[in-house]
Image: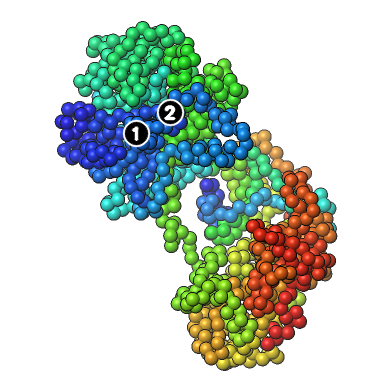
Amino acid sequence: MSDNGPFRLSAGGRLIDRAYQLPFRFDGRHLRGVQGDTLASALLANGQLMMGRSFKYHRPRGPMSSGAEEPNALLGLGQGGRFEPNQRATTTPLVGGMVTTSQNAWPSLDWDIGAINNLMYRFLPAGFYYKTFIHPRPAWKHLFEPIIRRSAGLGKAPTDADPDKYEQAYGFADVVIVGGGIAGLEAAKQAAAEGKSVAVLEQTAQFGGRTPTDHADGQARIDALVAELSNLPNVQLRRNTMATGLYDHGYLLAREALADHDPNAGIPRQRLWRIRAGQVITATGALERPLAFAGNDVPGVILASAVRDFINDYAVAPGRRIVVVTNNDDAYRTALTALDAGLQVPAILDARPNATGPLAEEARKRGIRVLTNSAIAGVKGHKAVEGVKVCDQTGSGTVREVIDADCVAMSGGWSPVVHLWSHCGGKLKWDDAKAMFEPDPNRPPTGADGKGMVLATGAAAGDLQVAALTGAVDEQPILPVWIMPAQATRKMRFKMWLDFQNDVKVSDVQLAAQEGYQSVEHTKRYTTLGMATDQGKVSNINGLAILSGALNQPIPATGTTTFRPPYTPLTLGAIAAEARGDVFQPLRKTAIHNWHEANGVAWEPVGLWRRPYCYPKAGESHSDAVAREIRAVRSGVGMLDASTLGKIIVKGPDAGKFLDMMYTNMMSTLPVGKCRYGLICNENGFLTDDGVAARLDEDTWLLHTTSGGADRIHGHFEDWLQCEWWDWKVYTANVTEQWAQIAVVGPKARDLMERLGGMDLSPEALPFMGWVEGDLGGIPVRIYRISFSGELSFEIAVPANRGLELWDKLQAAGRDLGVTAYGTEAMHVMRAEKGFIMIGDETDGTVIPQDLGLGWAISKKKTDYIGKRAQERSHMTSPDRWKLVGLESVDGRMIPDGAYVPAEGHNANGQRNTQGRVTSTYISPTLSKPIAMGLVWKGPDRMGEVIEFTNPGGEPVKARIVDPVFYDKEGTRSNG
Amino acid sequence: MLTLTCPYCGIAAEETELQPGGEAHLKRFGPGSSDADFEAYLFARKNPKGVHFERWRHAYGCGKWFLAARDTATLQVFGTYAAQTPHPTPEIVAAIRAARPDWQPDWATTNATSAESPKA
């Protein structure tokens, strides 16, 4: 039997198969477990009781539980990209070849230098950060913070990308039952009989919960129920599926472990279910509470139910001499189980004045010493239990006797798992007799219909024995015991752990109360009680009971902290699932995308689009390429893929009237065949988009928006049409993707266009700000003569499926003209040379058109447009507004991006006053000098003045205020 | 993650299909309005704990704006209805009253007139 480990029992083990041995490593040691083990049971079987160190004092830690609530036995799991910190050994199934490491210990788990904190406990009380590291001030930054940062955090984050796959799925069911114990399975049977679609989510690999362990015929009952449900077409049973959070209107998240820790399974590691549940039934059971006695954190002090589980489920003895300490009857089952397994139980210490229930009687009959009004005054041993000191529960800890033991099985009672009930607003009530918070059925979380959407059942509802289903024997009532013994000395309270991972003790919570903390939420944050990776599953009730005692108020007056999802930690992999790498977001491609890619493009993301930033040639930097592209356009002809520009059709008898409301200028008077630049503001008056409108016929306009603005502006139009002027006869359509758009730009643009033939593109036939339709080189097009560069420019709209064909024809026809594809950066620089604004550069959501010298695009005749009233507010008409100007560097240095112009004095926050900032700044290849635009206080009135821009790390940059149009002020070039 | 039923296409839409639009039944104040009226229209939004009327757009569905009456605390939805209504419909009012007998409509005072079209 030693093959299975020295602490493996010779018989039993409900969940293990001894025939299959699994090798694994722990801190470099080679160990063996068996099929069906958890990491915790395998380590215990090998005699490895100590599995980690606590966070603050580096105290030795062994497992305390056998389930998801485990605060102590947290391991680093795996290697490389598959490394995961803080994995609970009690819920991690053992897989052959696993590599595991202990945490928070250096140089080794057995001999840890950080344990020196343990000797300093008097100087590290609750809130010690807030008290200790205040003076001297500079010491915080240079001394305290670096040290605290190095010791902060439990476990290490992996450094490599996670190679595993994850997926998400949607689920729907009339009734979702969380918890596959006897209460959950019975609820499923009942709901299924009513004809409902039912899903049962069980967090572990086995159905049954505690029933098979705690009741003689439990396994048979569960097996029969599972067999019955498996045959029903309207029932789904899912094991290894942890319901992590319940949200509005029955939205439930659950994580299904498909191939956890088994990278060779060839399937996704985990699946995140996004379930919409008609009703949720929580059959989540209850968690056992520790008792607060001195030394309750020594490895080998284990929850009574967990001791029972290790023996029954895994045939592992957590110790050979087990002392049981309890305030309730349930822990007697552990004593009986231990006896059945051939282990010794030298005593049961019962805090109650008498123990007369059937379980106590049976224990006495089996020869166990049952000591009532008894408590533990202290635990002998440091890295493992060596014995317990026994005292009266009602006294102050005078030791009556010392009992040799290597394990303490403790039970402080049970707390229903109310997390899902509470996530979405369900309220709890305190039951004095049962000493527990349980769901208040009169105040459930409500769904869309205003009725309760969650029903708690079984132990999760406070019915701990589920006697109606399990046939459990009668139990004598629990005695609430929050401190053991009741009159414990100060010294003892320094050794009574509440939060085992974060090292929060009874003394810390009492100190917080003494220092004036009354709210349980504040006390939690001050002491860090319940803030560890287990989120206080075993510590919170004990903690708030201690706080209530210290504040001299009943427990319900203190209340609980807020329960928040997830119930147990979710991996980021499951949350992201397939949304990573190439499929992180959808990618929008123009019709000409592949040509750009084949021609050395450097991409720029614009919303979900990819636009060419520039096309660097071999050896060229991006700025070299941009300069070359600009010179080619200004001296010859260039081509820009402008397909991403938003294109919205507005049509109907009232379209003109409607557009007059949407734009600051008059659109209803635009003649058919003409184009007009327009501005769109929001109701706050701020400029949000701009673009060229073209009137296609009497009742149809085509509006261009910015590339990122198409959906937003279309939505803006629809909002006003549907919600304000719903009686106006107007339709809109976003046709952005129906058209490819190609700008042919430069002095030789007309020459190139005419080579394709088929259309008269003379200035007479197509004047500036006009448009025509026709066949260009045999392809149907609409050509707008509009210019964003200041050059002669044709923007050709072509059905998207022929965009690439037209682009290729133009490229071929213009080869001898040196036709050059240019990108967004060349476009940006050229528009800045011309003093044209760019939404998002010159505007930031606080800028009105009047700030930008665009008064000419604001109709004086119209009585109303969106934003007009706001632009009349006193702040908007103030002469003190910052306004757009050009900026010319005095010494030839470029103004840094984002630079500000300081002004005299300081504001109310002690920050330097400012009087302007730069909004666009470039080196102009055309003018061979830096150019910039900016918003400056009273800027247009200060022409010629020199102002200084901040320049972090260097001398301020001086610039002269000038006209924003740097190039071709007369505007003759756009005529070709 | 609310679900709201779009009154146009009848689909029980997930919140991820919807675009929120803030308080419903605002009366627009344009040029010529007083500073106080305009300020109230532009900035002063109700934020009640309880019955509230909201604008939602079935943005990733039929594209229509609609209105919803719901309780911001319990998340009960009393109903959804067309955006082209100056006030909650009698059916919506009845549904709210059925669940909240003490609730009183407040549009007699704050929304005295219906949303009118400005004369452009």
Please rate how many residues cluster around mark 2, counting C-alpha atoms within 10 Å: few if below 14, some from 14 to 19, many from 20.
few
Q: Which residue is mark 2?
A: A116
Residue A479 visible (yes or no) = yes
Looking at the picture, does residue A758 appear above or below residue A57? below
- Residue at image point 67% right, 50% down: B24
**Quadrant, the N terminus of chain A:** top left
Q: Earlier in the sequence, mark 1 or mark 2?
A: 1
| Chain at numbered mark 1 | A
Looking at the picture, does residue B32 appear above or below residue A270? below
Residue type at numbered disc 2:
Ile
| Chain at numbered mark 2 | A
Measuring from the top left, give residue B61's x and y in whole percent.
53, 59
Lateral position of residue A313 relative to residue A784, left or right: left
Q: Which residue is mark 1?
A: A109
- Residue at image point 26% right, 34% down: A42
Lateral position of residue A572 relative to residue A343, left or right: right
The circle drawn on residue A774 is none
Measuring from the top left, give residue A799's x and y in whole percent.
54, 79
Mark 2, secondary structure of its residue: helix
Viewer-closest of A352 and B89: A352
- Residue at image point 19% right, 33% down: A4
In terms of image quadrants, where is residue A315? top left
Residue A698 visible (yes or no) = no
Measured in 3D between alpha carbons, the distance from the residue under mark 1 to the one under mark 2, in whole angstroms, is 14 Å
Query: Are discs 1 and 2 less than 8 Å apart at CB?
Result: no
In terms of image quadrants, where is residue A947? bottom right
Measuring from the top left, give residue A577's x and y in whole percent.
41, 53
- Which-is-in-front pick, marks 1 and 2? 2
Mark 1, secondary structure of its residue: loop
